[in-house]
Image (cartoon, rainbow, N blue to C red):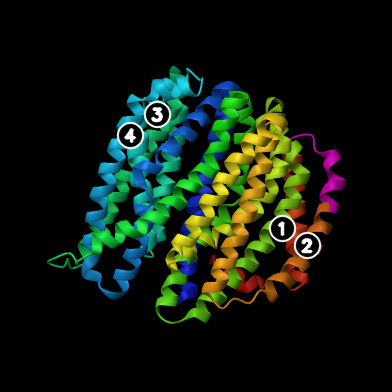
Amino acid sequence: MSIVDRISRGLKATLGANLVNVVANGLLIVVLARSLLTPEEYGLLFLSLSVLGVVTIFGTLGLPSSVARYVTEYAENEPAQVPHVVTSSLGILLALSLVTGTAVSLGGPWIAELLDEPGLAALLALGLGYVLFQALRTYLVKVFQGLNRVDYSALVNTLSAVCRVIFAVGFVLLGFGVVGALAGYVIGLFLAVAVGFGILYYRIYRTFDRAAQREDGLLRRIVEYSVPLTATRGAGVLDKRVDTILIGVLVNPAAVAFYTIGKQVSSVCTVPARALGFTVSPMYGEQQASDQDRRAARLYEQSLEHVLLLYVPAVVGLVLVAEPMVRHVFGAGYLGAVPVLQVLSLYILMSAINRITSDGLDFLGRARDRAIVKSATAISNFLLNLLLIPAFGVVGAAAATVVTYSVYTSVNIYIISRELPLRFGQAVRTTIGVGAVSLLMGAGVYLLLPFVSGPVRLFGVVAFGVLVWSAGVSLGGLIDVRRAMKLFT
């Protein structure tokens, strides 16, 4: 199968799963925020998820990403060792996640007291289940990615998202409140993990001839490579979660809700970039291992051009429609999220570029460099949050995120440019062209905003912006429509 066909298959599966995840999360957000929970309850739920997200670092360390790297390498050169990579690493992961999950469940009251949020104690009692199944879900997704079966990764993520909505909403409707919503997350993860391990064993594991003995030093290399990945993952989770925790401590749960809305919309917007990055990242390492550095470089350059074409206008559009979107989708009670969302629009662009860059560094053997940069920017983000949140509230937290993530993304681009023979001339020309199209699109959207009085008209304005963008990039020769469509058909 050619690289284009493999990218197309993986991209369609991953993008489809991400779209399902977006719809599921969107439905969950709207139902919980508008109908079932107050802003304070909604903020408390996501404060608990932020705490659990930080704790889960210790339940996985960097093992899933390290396993993905070695699965890719051995599947290409020595397939009989792949079963040993899987079983050895899985045993370590189970021990880590069980110990960590038990600790957070037992220590829930102490954490709640430390953060001065008594309502957290009941939520953190579910920590064992959340940490264990979240760790196993991450492991499965990464193993499937390393084997270039991102369609299976997509299936696991889809099941988790759909089941999460069903059970979270169902338990809240049954009267279990915020605790019921979190229990829905846990059950969704459990069901996805159960199906994922069935697929891993019957569709993949049994197809490999298992070597009689594990290669000397194999487990040591997996663990050693996981060390910088642990630093990267830890810094990444800290970078994404610490601002939410600090807002809960320094402001209040309602402010957490406003900030969470902004972050969730940002997450929705980066779906295409996440799908593309998840699909192409293993191919950078694969091409480099085959002494095809130039092919890997062209793959990255083309990915970067497509991201710029999509996300530069997205930033302009989001700044303009933030207020009517929050008002008509989430409700007037969440208008405090509008300035947060406008500031985070720049984060969306940086995040999209980073999605096709950072994971690729792991597969290119540059995990240590990425870990150093990520750790430095995570610490900087923490310090900036401490400085800006007391002065500017949730907008200060958003600004800190934009500044530090922009630095992180820029350095990652520099690192990958040292690893691959990249040429950025076309990307610069693409940025200039799409910038002009975005200004034209923004002017049209701005003139139509006064007519937005409900969700239907809001959708119409967004659709108009998309039409202007698509016509501009096509007529301007910025995108080969036929080639782009080939990836999805």
**In this figure, which residue is indicated by the disc labeled 3?**
183
Task: Identify the element where label 2 is drawn.
Answer: helix
User: Which label was assigned to residue 101?
Assistant: 4
Frontmost residue, 291 versus 385: 385
The local crowd at label 4, few if under 14, some if 14 to 19, many if 20 or more residues have their Cα within 10 Å, is many
- Say what amino acid the circle numbered 3 marks: Ala
Which label sits on residue 435?
2
Which dot marks residue 48? none
Question: Circle 3 — which element?
Answer: helix
The reply to whether the magenta stretch includes residue 444 is yes
The residue mark sitting in front, 1 or 4, is 4
Q: Is residue 12 visible?
A: no
Q: State the CA–CA distance, disc 2 to disc 1.
A: 7 Å
Magenta region: 443-454
Determine whether, in the image, residue 312 is placed left or right of residue 193. right
Q: Secondary structure at mark 1?
A: helix
CA distance separating discs 4 and 2: 47 Å
User: Could you tell me if the residues under marks 2 and 1 are in contact, i.e. CB atoms within 8 Å?
Assistant: yes
Q: Earlier in the sequence, mark 3 or mark 2?
A: 3
Position of residue 11 relative to residue 382, above or below, is below
Callouts 4 and 2 close, C-beta under 8 Å: no
- Under tag 4, what secondary structure? helix
Position above or below: 25 against 284: above
